[in-house]
Image (tube, rainbow, N blue to C red):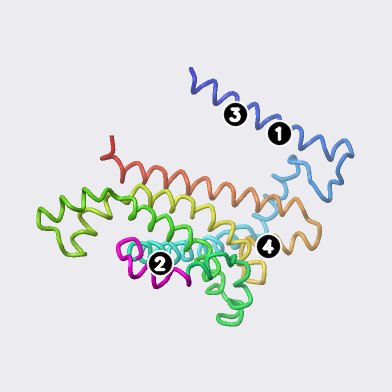
């Protein structure tokens, strides 16, 4: 019953939000050119699909998203593991990390254009930068948080090499923390997609900028909701995968 009640309350809240949104432009409280009513969104979506623009934009953004997420997350896990296992490595890179970490992904756009041109690789670079730090710190913290007693027990049983310690103790014990960072990165990557595409790389971000320049705000909302839906699908799939990977936990 609690689940049913929660679902009904959530549905009621969403319905109230949509009604409020619909009323604002209908009552003249907001210019419809600035905030289109939600009832106009399905028609705008169907127009984009009929023109073939929506599938191409989504396919392009998905390719940037998946590759950028993979590159950034892979680098973040790899360097996070090394930093978490090696105090000297962490000490050597400490000031470099402090220098680079505060720089937002959007600030790298000029270098992305200079290095890669207005190409998909530039978008992948921006997305990877946005994802890297989240996964790096999550991995480093997860490895640092592994119970030292586990490592001592592993050494007592002969797992003394760094590779054995990593594969048998550190990586399994740190996996929950790493997965938390990866789940956060799923959302951050979608934020970075728009930033990565606004300078001309084909995709959802570029199409949103084109539509906004023409005050086609209904189209902008179509792609905002598209990203929200895609993130929901990715997040749901990741939660299912996370549950399978961590089914050993009580």
Closer to the eye: label 2 or 4: 2
**Number of numbered markers:** 4
Secondary structure beneath label 1: helix
| Foreground pick, 193 / 97 | 97
Left or right, 114 with respect to 94, comes to: right
Q: Earlier in the sequence, mark 3 or mark 2?
A: 3
Considering every residue shown, the one lying at the far bottom of the view is 114
Residue ID for mark 1: 17
Badge 2: how crowded within 10 Å, few (<14), some, or many (20+)? some
In the picture, the disc for residue 75 is 2
Does the segment drawn in magenta span residue 247?
no
Please say if 150 is above or below 249: below
Contact, CB < 8 Å: mark 1 with mark 2? no
Inter-mark Cα distance, 3 to 1: 11 Å
Inter-mark Cα distance, 3 to 4: 31 Å
Q: Main secondary structure of the magenta part?
A: helix
In the picture, the disc for residue 10 is 3
Inter-mark Cα distance, 1 to 4: 26 Å
Contact, CB < 8 Å: mark 3 with mark 2? no
Among the 4 quarters of the image, the one containing residue 188: bottom right
Percent across and percent down for residue 36 are 79, 46
Magenta residues (range):
83-96
Which quadrant: the C terminus? top left
């Amino acid at each position: 019953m609690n689940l049913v009640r929660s679902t009904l309350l959530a549905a009621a809240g969403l319905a109230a939000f949509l009604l409020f949104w619909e009323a604002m432009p209908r009552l003249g409280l907001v210019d419809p050119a600035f905030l289109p009513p939600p009832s106009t969104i399905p028609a705008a979506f169907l127009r984009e699909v009929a023109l073939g623009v929506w599938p191409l934009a989504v396919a392009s953004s998905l390719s940037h998203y998946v590759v950028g997420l993979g590159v950034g997350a892979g680098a973040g896990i790899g360097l996070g593991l090394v930093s978490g296992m090696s105090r000297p490595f962490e000490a050597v890179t400490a000031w470099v990390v402090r220098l680079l970490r505060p720089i937002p992904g959007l600030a790298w756009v000029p270098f992305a254009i200079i290095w890669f041109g207005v190409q998909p690789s530039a978008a992948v670079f921006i997305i990877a930068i946005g994802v890297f730090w989240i996964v790096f710190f999550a991995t480093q913290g997860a490895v640092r948080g592994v119970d030292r007693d586990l490592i001592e027990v592993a050494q007592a049983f002969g797992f003394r090499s760094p590779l054995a310690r990593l594969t048998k103790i550190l990586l399994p014990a740190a996996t929950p923390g790493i997965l938390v960072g990866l789940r956060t990165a799923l959302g951050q990557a979608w934020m970075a997609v728009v930033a990565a595409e606004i300078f001309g790389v084909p995709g959802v971000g570029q199409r949103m900028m084109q539509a906004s320049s023409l005050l086609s705000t209904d189209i902008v909302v179509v792609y905002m909701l598209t990203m929200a839906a895609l993130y929901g699908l990715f997040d749901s799939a990741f939660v299912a995968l996370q549950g399978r990977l961590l089914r050993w936990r009580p």
